Amino acid sequence: MNKEKLKMSGKVTVGQQIAYGVGDFAGNLLSGATASYIALYYTDNVFMSAVFVGTMMMAARILDAVSDLVMGYIIDHTQTKIGKARPWFIISIIPLVLTFLLMFHVPAGLGIEGQKIYIAATYILNTVVCMTILNVSYSTLCTFMSDDIQTRVKLTGTRTFFATLAMMLANIFTVNILSKYGFSQQGYTVMVLLYGGVAVFCLALTALICKESTTIAEDTTAKKKATLKESFAVIFSNRYIPILAVAFALNWLLLGVNGASMVYYVRDVLGGMQYMGIVSAASFIPALLILAIGIVPRIAGKYGKRITLTVGGAIEALGLLIVSILPISLPVTVVGMILKAIGMAFVNALLFATVSDVAVYTDITQKGDYSGVTNSITSFGQKIGIGVGSAAVGWLLAWGQYDATLDLQTAQTQTAEHMGFSIIPCICAVVIIILISFINVDKKLMELRQQN
């Protein structure tokens, strides 16, 4: 066993911590806008059928199952002067933003079949290729910035704060921008140009300030480089990795289907887009406050990640259950979303921190360099969850016989939107709690440190 790996290496300054966080602000600003509004854009502006939109998104997620693991493998076999993950993070920035712009600009003159091909090509390029490179390299960067458990919890807590802030802003400001322009193509153009510019700035800041620890880099360089077959074997033989992959997928399915359904639920079930701001605020502001004052690292440090994750998941499930079973009203929705946001703060931050722990644990126990492959499960889970969530909304709308030309949707359509907004997310939250009970990697890492 390599004792050097068990030392606390890679001290992180407050500036680096913030710079790391703004990277996820950019990523979630783009992915949040995509998850919440791309289905609406395709169905209401391009007039694609909900069935096509849902099926296309599901097909993209199947491709994701391979792309994330392959990207992790590539990072594990990358050696440059600026690190292993950081070069790929830098490479991904411009293509990611460009494909984001193209997704929300479907040419009208292509015809129905041509538009379908364009939609599939740009959506897959953005989510399967560009977002994969960004997310896997970004998550792996955390592992290479510091080998200290508590430092990584702080990094992922900061990351989650900025990610939550981005998701909230994507919901609140996007609807304001689009409403101003009557949800026309011009509104979407203003939105993507604004968000694209902000994303480039934030991602460039992360790339310039966040650097990989030389101590960790030297240690990984000395390790055996696994083949692709060996990397896959490690993934499926490690008890923690499959559990975390499913937990990530369910967590972002929860967030994805809830976020993509929100605009439909607020408009059609609650009765008007004027409620979008308060529902979005209730869904995110409590999480921002918890993450901003640093409660998560302190509680996790005292009680352990597993217990803290379980309590957070229970609070999140309770909030969604309230919205699912109580009579529909704005106050009930707001209370439920506040509880969901409180639980989300703990679950999101600690899931990312747990993945970094698993990456270190896997490297130690397998005596190899598997950090990239292990961290690829974060991108895999996020995109599978968000993608399936968006696809599920398409399928739910199709089942509910959603008609974009109607001012008042039918009762069946509203039931479908309610299912997407709270019922399906509540089921996901309960399953996540069960999965968390099997994860005790932070305890195992502490035992390894004490032995050395």
Image: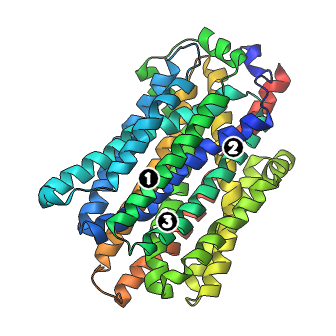
- 286 vs 110: above or below: below
Q: Tag 1, which secondary structure?
A: helix
**Three-letter amino acid code at the position of disc 1:** Leu
Tell me the residue at 36%/90% (across/down).
408
The disc placed on residue 156 is 2
Measuring from the top left, give residue 45's x and y in whole percent. 29, 68
Residue 174 visible, this orientation? yes
Q: Tag 3, which secondary structure?
A: helix
Camera-side residue of 185 and 19: 185
Tell me the residue at 12%/59% (across/down).
111
- 16 vs 294: above or below: above
Q: Earlier in the sequence, mark 3 or mark 1?
A: 3
> How far is the residue under mark 3 from the one under mark 1?
12 Å
Camera-side residue of 62 and 193: 193
**Three-letter amino acid code at the position of disc 2:** Thr
Tell me the residue at 76%/14% (across/down).
4
Is 143 situated left or right of 370 in this image?
right
Answer with the quarter of the image where residue 330 lies.
bottom right
> How far is the residue under mark 3 from the one under mark 2?
26 Å
- 245 vs 77: above or below: below
The disc placed on residue 174 is 3
Measuring from the top left, give residue 432's x and y in whole percent. 59, 57
User: What is the crowding at mark 1: few (fewer than 14 residues within 10 Å), some, or many (at least 20)?
Assistant: some
**Three-letter amino acid code at the position of disc 3:** Thr
Answer with the quarter of the image where residue 405 lies.
bottom left
Camera-side residue of 31 and 414: 31
Q: Quadrant of the N terminus?
A: top right
Residue corresponding to mark 1: 193
Q: Quadrant of the C terminus?
A: top right
Measuring from the top left, give residue 390's x and y in whole percent. 40, 61
Instruction: Give the colouring mode of the picture.
Output: rainbow
